[in-house]
Image (cartoon, rainbow, N blue to C red):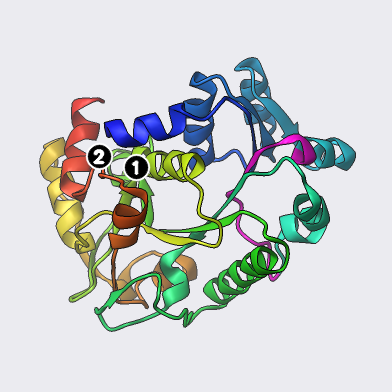
Amino acid sequence: MSKQNRNSIEAVSPSKLFCFGLGYTALNLANRLKYLGWEISGTTRNPEKYKSLKNQGIRCMLIPDEPVDNIHQAVRESSCILISIPPQGKQDWVLEIFKEDIARSSNLQWLGYLSTTGVYGNHDGEWVDEETPPQPNSERSFVRAQVEKQWLELFHESGLPVHLFRLVGIYGPGRGMLARLLKGTMQRIDSPGQLFSHIHVDDIVQVLTTSIGQPNPGSVYNLCDDTPVSQREAVEYACQLLKMEPPPLVALEDSNLGPLGKSFYLDRKRVSNNKLKSELGVELIFPDYFKGLESLIKNA
């Protein structure tokens, strides 16, 4: 993490973070802030994770067992809220149940909503940035775009300190292409002209902590590295690092991907990250996906 960004969050007095969804990304942020003295709480639907996190000193609330009043109270007491759970069907659980608590909170200084660059839809390989109007071409991305709009409406209506973060493919220790190759579940897809962007979880944490340290309510940021790459090229390079033969090359229509997996191949676009650099002053730790894979091999 750059000196500038490290000082940005460390200059903030330790406070309270509440995470709706203590998943992979949220836990990495929580552990960073916990190290800096923050009090962490949040939700999970996984009983095993619930026990583990409680043992780590994180106030974890098991859904649906936790009394909802306890969650309401924790939300009202928190200065920062991260929402990392996707909508269920056409509904956003957080907006549906906790919208009023969040909107009326006198303690809230920062709210981050983790979304997806899928809201941009297809652009035939052209670049998109935060000024590009969303034009989702799947029901899942359409709902995401609607939820984004609802959060931004709360910012405009009540000054709620909302920040939207549109993420690409997340990878890091224990998650991503290397882990799937080692498990034998990774395919090498032949999809000419298709490019994907990626983001290392350490860079997500860097962006989120920088935003907490210098909030700019109403802002939208793309979280991605500098260089989109094809899935085929990435798999082949990862196999080279692992010293293994790449899986057979298959056409998308012949792959065993389900409808969700295949839907990611419908959109062709390049995603710009210029705003997170210019506005937040972030220098990516892993600006190149191949360098990020190399670091995971070295630290394995």
> Is 157 or 289 nearer to us in this picture?
157
**Magenta stretch: residue 214 in it?**
no
Q: In the rendering, which numbered label is found on residue 75?
A: none
- Badge 2 or badge 1: first in the primary sequence: 1
Name which residue type carries label 1.
Asp
Is residue 293 visible to us here?
Answer: yes
Residue 295 at x, y percent in the picture? 20, 33
In what element is the residue under mark 1? helix
Q: x, y percentage for residue 284?
A: 26, 44
- Which corner quadrant holds the N terminus? top left
Mark number, residue 285: 2
Asked where in the image residue 127 lies, by quadrant, the reply is bottom left
Task: Judge left or right: residue 122 versus residue 219.
Answer: left
Q: Provide residue 187's location: percent of width, then percent of height.
A: 28, 57
Q: Residues within 10 Å of mark 1 (few under 14, many from 20)?
A: many
Report the Cα–Cα distance between label 2 and label 1: 6 Å
Per the image, the residue denoted by label 1 is: 203
253, above or below 75, in the image: below
Verify CB contact (< 8 Å) between mark 2 and mark 1: yes
Amino acid type assigned to the residue bearing label 2 in the image: Ile
Residue at (41, 35) in percent of width and height:
8
Q: Which residues are magenta?
A: 75-90
Residue at 60%, 58% in the rendered image: 86
Q: Which image quarter: residue 268?
A: bottom left
Is 160 in front, or is 50?
A: 160
